[in-house]
Amino acid sequence: MTDAARPDDRPTVTDAELREAITLASLTYLDENDDDPFIQRMIIETFLGYDDLPTAGWQLAWGPASNNTNLWYIARSPGGDRFALVIRGTVMTDWRSKLDDIDIPLVAPLIEGAPDGARIAQGLATCQGRLNGARDVWEHVTAWEYLGGVLDAGHTLDVVGHSLGGALAPIVSLDAMARFPDVAVRSLAIAGMSPGNQAFSHWYVGSLRHQQASRFINRFDIIPEWYAGLSTMQDGFPGGPSCPLKISALIEAMKLYMDVERIQYVATPSPREFPGVIYADRSWTEEAEGQHEHLYYMYLAGVPLEVIHRRFPRYPQWQPPANQPSSDPS
């Protein structure tokens, strides 16, 4: 079924569910440079125990497990009827992770039953393969093996990720649908790059049976323009800083390479767009980082600023743009 043929009566992801999702995704970045799974597990469990975060009552069910620079974990909702498979984004301090972001030749996804012609980025396929093989150090099972032992038709599985994790979420959600056809699988792809080509996008959108929204972005975040929107990245901050020449040259080189190699990416639909605001007092690179920041997505989703400051302290302290309207649901 194509996206045009998909009925529009699917349920929406609620604001509360979206706040849970971006918070779950944010926990993957805590102490991201530490490879000790025991410390990572302790940190995630600690944060899931905070009753002022949207994830209060969630429990760590499996993991975290990592392979190379890729990491994911599974959490279970307070009522026990929902599981979240949460994928970490790019580790910006590790060059190996950045290489995955620019590995853009199109290849077939590692999913049983993928339609002919559906293609995704080579770097994303590499990350997918690593995650598929990642075993936790406690039970020595993969995420798929764990889920196979606990999921049934009464459960919902949310595949959650921010940035690189948001690019992988559509791919992993399709894999989950193939593995667990009786389970309600949803994709909460936040600030993710374009995963693949037109055939992949049609397959993905046409497969979503349990949600309307399939992509969540800040309107001034340029990272989701990578790869399908390269032509608009340089002009991503109207009224803000101009794109530096060296970055513009890199983008132009990427566009030329994609044209020569006939690499055609298509962005998945974005029915949910957050009303971000330009910082305006930053360089182009700083603006790009600020608009993509996972804490900004938490704030835009409605997590109170005082809670973000309390639980995610930084030096200097993170702040939204000065003229950003409050999105606190209270």
Image: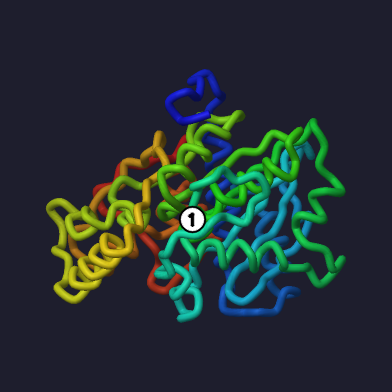
Give the class, few, some or many, for how many residues have Cα within 10 Å of label 1's Cα (few <14, many ≥20). many
The image quadrant that residue 30 belongs to is: bottom right
Please name the amino acid that badge 1 sits on. Answer: Ile
The image quadrant that residue 110 belongs to is: bottom right
- Horizontal side of residue 76 vs 117, given as left or right: right
Residue 32 screen position, x and y as percent: 57, 73
The answer to which of 65 and 78 lies nearer the viewer is: 65
The answer to which of 83 and 280 lies nearer the viewer is: 83
| For residue 171, above or below residue 134 | above
Q: Colour scheme of this structure image?
A: rainbow
- Horizontal side of residue 198 vs 77, given as left or right: left
Q: Which residue does the image show at 56% across and 36% down from the upper left?
A: 16
Q: Secondary structure at mark 1?
A: strand
Residue 165 screen position, x and y as percent: 53, 58
* Count of numbered labels shown in the rendering: 1
Q: Which residue is mark 1?
A: 120
- Horizontal side of residue 39 vs 235, given as left or right: right
In the current view of this chain or complex, which residue is farthest to the front? 116
The answer to which of 60 and 321 lies nearer the viewer is: 60
Residue 69 screen position, x and y as percent: 58, 74
Q: Which residue does the image show at 69% across and 62% down from the upper left?
A: 132
The answer to which of 251 and 322 lies nearer the viewer is: 251
Residue 26 screen position, x and y as percent: 54, 58
Q: Is residue 330 visible?
A: no
Q: Which residue does the image show at 46% across and 81% down from the upper left?
A: 95
| For residue 86, above or below residue 28 | above
Q: Which residue does the image show at 19% across and 60% down from the upper left?
A: 234
